[in-house]
Image (cartoon, coloured by chain):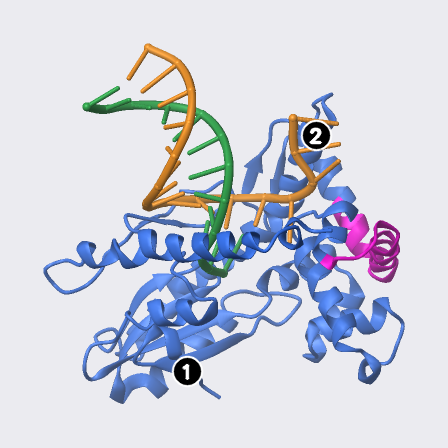
Chain colours: A blue, B green, C orange
Amino acid sequence: MKLRDAHPIIADILLYRELQKLLSTYIDNLPHLIGEDGRLHTTLNQAGTTTGRMSSTNPNLQNIPVRGEMGTEIRDAFVAPQGSTLLALDYSQIEMRVLAALSEDEHLIEIFRTGVDVHTSVASRVFKVAEKDVTSEMRRKAKVINFGIVYGMGVNALKDNLGSTRAEAQEFYDNYFLTFPKIAAYFEEVKSHAKKDGFTTTYFGRRRFFAGLKSPIPYIRAGAERMAMNAPLQGTAADIIKIAMQKAHEGLAEAKLLDKAHLLLQIHDELLFEVEEGSVKKAREVIEYAMEHAIDFPVPVTVSVFQGPRWGSMEDVK
DNA sequence: TTAGATAGCGCG
DNA sequence: AAAGCGCGCTATCTAA
């Protein structure tokens, strides 16, 4: 039994916390930080993280709410000026694609090369049913493990996230690695290499060093191993989008669009631009191409594109 | 009174 | 003691 079900007040407490968080962190504060130019300016730290990602401070614009109705309302307060529109382009399942590339797992590579839905396809393979027979429940479970695998999630966390029994989670976990054997081998390789040399590398060779991989204390060692497993994936994704940002700039310069399209923000796997209305189509083509062709990679990288005057309610651009 | 640590939660 | 990676901000508690 979950604590949430133990007493009716739990739901009220959680709702209160959610509203209080949004009120204190965003609604009450952000308006005061608007500058004389009518804009909110963040500071991006290029070397602010262990993995190679950027971070954003004062205010942090990489954690503006997006989920739920209230997320939409808060984002809708971010608007493009008259005559311009917001254009957002985000990588699809970038870390899973990086995992496919680094592990060289033929099955995962195949999934991304054929362009099928990754969660459905993984479910189909792990549960050994045809893709058309994948139920929504099977897809949900595959989605949970696909996300978790990137973080070095173990059986215990998998069980909690699936809401299943320990035995069920164990079977699912085992079947996953039997289905994608190179992924299991890849993680073992990363761990042993990190333990021997003290660092991991991204696809492009950037290193992250670790302490704790040789610790005699099991939970310290296990924690370091999860960090080591995740670092090349998150780190390579971070490398990719930084390269893409440069290529997008070059592309826009080449197309004489630098005064029409302005990069506002990078949110780890997503770029947000402000674009003059007459230049949206061309800018979108240039940026999308730059992002999708930023690197030579054994699996395709694809982006989804969204457009609209308000950040909270942008529409899919086909 | 203030600086530092912790709990909790927003995002990818 | 902890069992899922990477961040930053607010509220609260603790120590000086």
Residue on which the image places disc 1: A285
Residue A220 horizontal/vertical position (percent): 67, 28
Q: Amino acid at mark 2?
A: Tyr
**What is the crowding at mark 1: few (fewer than 14 residues within 10 Å), some, or many (at least 20)?**
few
**Residues in magenta, as a range:** A162-187
- Disc 1 residue type (three-letter): Glu
Mark 2 sits on what residue?
A: A219
Residue A218 drawn in magenta: no
Q: Nearer the viewer, mark 1 or mark 2?
A: 2
Q: Give the letter of the chain under mark 1.
A: A
Same chain for mark 1 and mark 2? The answer is yes
Residue A160 picture location, percent across and down: 72, 51
Q: Nearer the viewer, residue A175 or A184?
A: A175
Residue found at the far left of this picture: A36
> Image point 76% across, 49% down: which residue?
A186
Left of A26 or right of it: where is A32?
A: left
Label 2 Cα crowd, 10 Å radius (few <14 / some 14-19 / many 20+): few
Mark 1 residue element:
helix
Q: Is residue A288 left or right of residue A126?
A: left
